Image (spheres, rainbow, N blue to C red):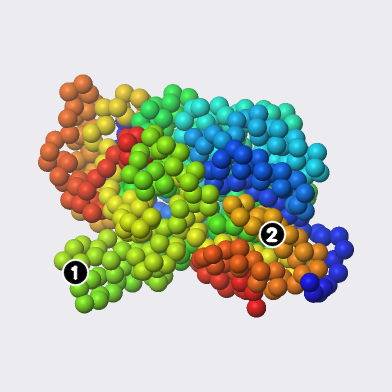
Amino acid sequence: MAVSNANASPRVRLSLGPIQYHWPKEEMLDFYRTIESTPVDIVYLGETVCSKRRSFRHQDWIEVAERLQTAGKEVVLSTLALLEADSELGYVRRLCNNGKFTIEANDMSAVQMLAGKTHFIGGASLNIYNPRTLSKLVSLGMTRWVMPVELSKSVLAGFQNEMPAGIESEVFGWGRLPLAYSARCYTARAHELSKDDCANCCIDYPDGLTLSTREDKRFLVINGIQTQSARVHSLVHELNDPAAGPDILRISPQSEDTELVISLFHHARLGSLKADEAAYKLERCSPVGLCDGYWHGEAGMTACGRPGGP
Amino acid sequence: MELVCPAGNLPSLKAAVDNGADAVYIGFRNETNARHFAGLNFSSEQIKQGLNYARSHGTEVYVAINTFPQPGTFEKWETAVDQAADYGVDALIVADIGVMDYAAEKWPELRLHLSVQGSATSHEAVRFYAEQFGVQRAVAPRVLSVKQVASLVDHSPIPIEVFGFGSLCVMVEGRCYLSSYVTGQGPNTFGACSPASFVRWSETDSMLETRLNGVLIDRVNKDENAGYPTICKGRFRVNGKTSYAIERPTSLNTLPILPDLLRIGVAAIKIEGRQRSPAYVATVTKVLRAAIDSCIRDPENFRPERAWMSQLRSLSEGVQTTLGAYERTWQ
């Protein structure tokens, strides 16, 4: 591996986002056992997409959280992005009252439960688009915010001029972009099932179900009630210029190669691997190709910087 | 149960007022609202005229300032709030926390409604906006079943408004990036979904293709109607099958469940469509007015008249309607 510059203590921390897909329990347990020995600094845990996915019960999440914490990771519990049923609200309340782990609030219900009581992290699906919104949430206890995925590097820079002291910024740095949430389950729809009788069919798609255009261009990924980009959003090049970027880059889990992705990002942040080289290797971890348009203020699907290497 | 109607210009506002709207909602002619389309919306002078007309007929006017300012652009939203407050509008429909914070601080007497773009789907989320900014009404996203709306109404500290008719967002509003993923411009950042400048219609020998920034959204036979290329209403391939994988081109129509919405205590029914014509506004307002009045008179025996249903269908996307998420089987 070529050494470009020697950043002995990496300024940018790496986080692992919540698993966005429905995986069987054993695979989730194996996955997090592997994560214990990877160089990610922060791990977000929890079901953020669909409350019908129950591979893990509450106690399973807490046990994994404790193991990861023992392994030296900062552990955060993430809440559902779209709440509809009262039972879902009840579960978010239980998470918020867990008394031990910090919460990433992914909708305003969670913010309401946490505001003024305990510090929290504002997830990417809260709409924090301007410094006044950020400051308001900081005044209520938010200590870190994840920028909405559709915002750019220059928007982040605009925030940094007016950022309240002590607030950390995190950016979605690797993975299929979460683009939308719905009442309808599209995986069930593809199987001609209704959501109430979905038979947990999304468990058969560990990286979601690809939706292509009628010209066979892989366009989006259906993940239950969530819609994602088919391309993987990659900001590995940001690690070349950490001074201008966020405090934390988030890597979103995928069913294969997550460990390799973490390792490539880690070596890129250390400077022991050139970002171009990392990007070249990362391209092989994404069958549909990479994108970074949002980060450059363009359409999210475009590859404008050098997301896929030199 | 009030009727809240859309207006993209003065003739539409008059059509809404004349046909029985309790309130009309409008927007400024810029990206501060979620219908930022060329040639649409109100100049300052037109807002004043519209207010006068509505006032003289006892109709309220709400101004939608329901997009999300970014660093360096906040002043434009402040100006919109200040102007609307100066004109004495009855309420602002707002989505952004920063904009609400500004409005509540600068104009504490001004009534605020939470826009559907605020994406509050639970009573706890609604409570946040009520407690922090004194928001007095919330518009529920189109993701809840009737039973879930009932629970929201029961537990919410403030009245709840729901959509009754119009184009159907199938993704939870305020957090859908499909348009910006393809074009770089979306509802939150630009005030429009699938902006017209990115739309291309092209003909092959026998087919008509619709594209959004180059992405093929649908392809129809020349004798079929091609819908506007909104991503969620396109035809795509999933598991080898081509279909409307997300939703068909269709509009929401709640006439069949009006008695349920009345019974559970919904405060207002909203019609979508500021981008539509004055004729659309007139017809839909008239039908919904008649239906709501009939429902309030005798909810037990209320049945939507066939003429109402066919009039609404003729103004719908794809000439078909749905109950959307209100009905669990749709989900």
- Residues at marks 2 and 1 on the same chain: no
Chain letter of mark 1 equals B
Which image quarter: residue B90?
A: top left
Q: Where is residue A70 in the image (x, y as percent from the top left)?
A: 80, 38
Q: Quadrant of the C terminus of chain A?
A: bottom right
Q: How many labels does the image show?
A: 2
Front-most of B262 and A34? A34
Which image quarter: residue A69?
A: top right
Chain letter of mark 2 equals A
Residue with the mark numbered 2: A260
Q: In this view, does B155 lie to the left or right of B277?
A: right
Tag 1: amino acid: Lys
The residue positioned 70% from the left and 37% from the top of the image is: A64
Residue with the mark numbered 1: B222
Tag 2: amino acid: Leu
Q: Where is residue A90 in the image (x, y as percent from the top left)?
A: 55, 27
Camera sees residue B26: yes
Instruction: Determine the residue located farthest toward the left in the rendered image.
Output: B307
Q: In this view, does A252 lie to the left or right of B126?
A: right
Camera sees residue B129: no
Q: Are marks 2 and 1 in contact (CB under 8 Å)?
A: no
The residue positioned 71% from the left and 57% from the top of the image is: A262
Q: Which mark is residue A33?
A: none
